[in-house]
Image (cartoon, rainbow, N blue to C red):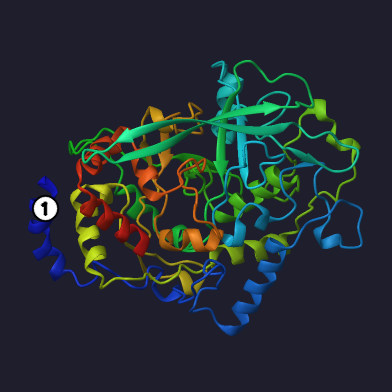
């Protein structure tokens, strides 16, 4: 195989780099916890008093919110339309969500984004500059399939899969699932005929504060929107609206890097997923036709600034688990294959974080395997739904750290990968890659079974 020669040539340079297989993926924040709660640990270098702050944030992240009015006034204001009543409902044990069963009543940990194409008018162009998408007129920017008593849910999400087989060069066949999203039991009339749907499972919560602490300079140094170096990779940063700063900045969070900070990501989730307002989102995802003002609320700011501080601190300091199996020859060979395939051109292995307002996150050597940039992933993964600068085939490179813990955190043999959870295994996820990753995918198809097993062993060591 051509890869054997390439990886042999790489061995000498890798041997010199003593940090090629780092144990501490999150620097000093790394936890040695394993098992189902591996993603729920505080950064290992947090002081005792900061661990108390982490626990406070955890309580608001984990426990359910309730309808208003309630004696639990710190957690009231749910709805009237929502997808879940707790952050943990989507981020299961702080890990990734999963798509619903085909006949499930509620999607719960998978969301469906809604939008319509812009008509190009100045008014809509200004709206896009701040909001990134044009919401569906009757249903807003996200379908909410649950409601408080007396309110009507927006609809039900149904997922149907069409399967096809990919035959690898050694004759192995891999079944891939191609999901189709249908919305039934619509509560507020027909969807706009031009509605764009995009299914999204919740991503893992680990290491997010470290990603926030990577300097903008380091991220933008990876940009190559016109592929000036001719390597077939043309990543670019999304540019999104920062509600707090009232300006456009680079996006880091979300499947299309549509949010600039963890605080805004959290506030957006409160508003869209739970119908809960905050200083950054004074309104939830209701439209005029839904008349949400007719239902009780928990006050103008249903999430107080103190609670938002606590939840943001929690989400910033969830630790990345320690890598495993670094000395396994299969893992070592698999990393060499990963580099030879060119995967690291998007899944950038390491950074040193800059100065963050949390000392625990500052100046940490981390290994997230992402560039946080947008890349064209081809027609197979396209949702055809733009978001700020991201087009319908572009997705932000997801971090790979923690991949080896995904199934045990999920409590399932299938961990559900990619933006909509269609891939049940890492090999399936690789075989869905296209666009800028097409050449790497074809090289995986050409591998023999030994090389494929080595590549997967490396990914599972992260």
Q: Kindly tell me whether residue 462 is visible in this rendering.
A: no
- Give me the residue at 59% from left, 29% from top: 181
SS label for mark 1: helix
**Left or right: residue 42 compared with residue 144:** left
Q: Position of residue 445 (x, y in %)?
A: 25, 40
- Name the residue located 37 percent from the left edge and 69 percent from the top edge: 323
Image location of residue 313, percent across then percent down: 60, 66
Query: In the image shown, does 1 or 144 lie closer to the viewer?
Result: 1
Extreme residue toward the bottom, this view = 48
Left or right of 129? Residue 282 is right
Foreground of the two, 402 or 422: 422
**Residue drawn where x is 11% and y is 52% of the image:** 4
Answer above or below: position of 25 versus 136. below
- Expressed as whole percent of the image width and height from the top left, the position of residue 434 reads 33, 34
Quarter that holds the C terminus: bottom left
User: In this orientation, which residue lies closer to the viewer: 83 or 49?
Assistant: 83
């Amino acid at each position: 195989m051509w890869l054997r020669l390439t990886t042999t040539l790489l061995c000498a340079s890798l041997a010199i780099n003593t940090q090629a297989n780092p144990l501490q993926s999150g620097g000093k924040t790394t936890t040695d916890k394993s098992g189902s709660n591996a993603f729920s640990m505080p950064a290992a270098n947090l002081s005792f008093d900061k661990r108390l702050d982490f626990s406070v944030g955890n309580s608001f992240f984990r426990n359910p919110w309730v309808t208003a009015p309630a004696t639990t006034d710190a957690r009231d204001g749910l709805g009237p339309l929502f997808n879940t009543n707790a952050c943990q409902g989507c981020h299961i044990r702080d890990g990734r969500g999963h798509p619903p069963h085909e006949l499930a009543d509620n999607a719960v940990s998978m969301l469906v984004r809604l939008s319509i194409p812009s008509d190009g008018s100045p008014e809509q162009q200004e709206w896009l500059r701040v909001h990134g998408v044009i919401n569906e007129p009757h249903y807003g920017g996200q379908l909410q399939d649950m409601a408080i008593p007396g309110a009507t849910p927006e609809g039900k999400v149904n997922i149907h899969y069409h399967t096809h087989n990919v035959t690898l060069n050694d004759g192995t066949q891999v079944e891939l699932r191609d999901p189709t999203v249908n919305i039934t039991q619509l509560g507020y009339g027909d969807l706009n005929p031009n509605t764009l749907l995009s299914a999204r499972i919740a991503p893992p919560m680990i290491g997010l504060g470290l990603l926030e602490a990577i300097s903008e300079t380091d991220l933008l140094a990876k940009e190559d929107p016109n592929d000036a170096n001719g390597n077939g990779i043309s990543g670019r940063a999304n540019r999104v609206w920062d509600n707090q700063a009232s300006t456009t900045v680079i996006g880091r969070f979300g499947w299309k890097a549509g949010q600039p900070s963890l605080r805004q990501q959290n506030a957006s989730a409160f508003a869209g997923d739970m119908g809960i307002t905050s200083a950054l989102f004074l309104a939830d995802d209701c439209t005029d036709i839904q008349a949400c003002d007719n239902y009780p609320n928990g006050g103008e700011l249903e999430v107080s600034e103190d609670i938002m501080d606590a939840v943001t601190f929690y989400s910033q300091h969830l630790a990345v688990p320690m890598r495993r199996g670094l000395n396994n020859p299969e893992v070592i060979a698999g990393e060499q294959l990963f580099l030879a395939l060119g995967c690291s051109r998007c899944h950038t292995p390491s950074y040193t974080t800059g100065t963050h307002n949390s000392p625990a996150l500052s100046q940490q050597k981390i290994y997230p395997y992402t560039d946080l940039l947008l890349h064209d992933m081809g027609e197979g993964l396209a949702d055809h739904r733009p978001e700020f600068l991201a087009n319908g085939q572009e997705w932000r490179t997801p971090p790979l750290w923690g991949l080896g813990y995904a199934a045990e955190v999920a409590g399932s043999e299938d961990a559900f990968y990619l933006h909509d959870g269609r891939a049940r295994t890492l090999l399936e996820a690789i075989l869905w890659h296209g666009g800028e990753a097409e050449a790497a995918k074809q090289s995986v198809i050409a591998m023999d079974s030994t090389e494929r097993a080595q590549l997967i062993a490396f990914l599972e060591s992260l």
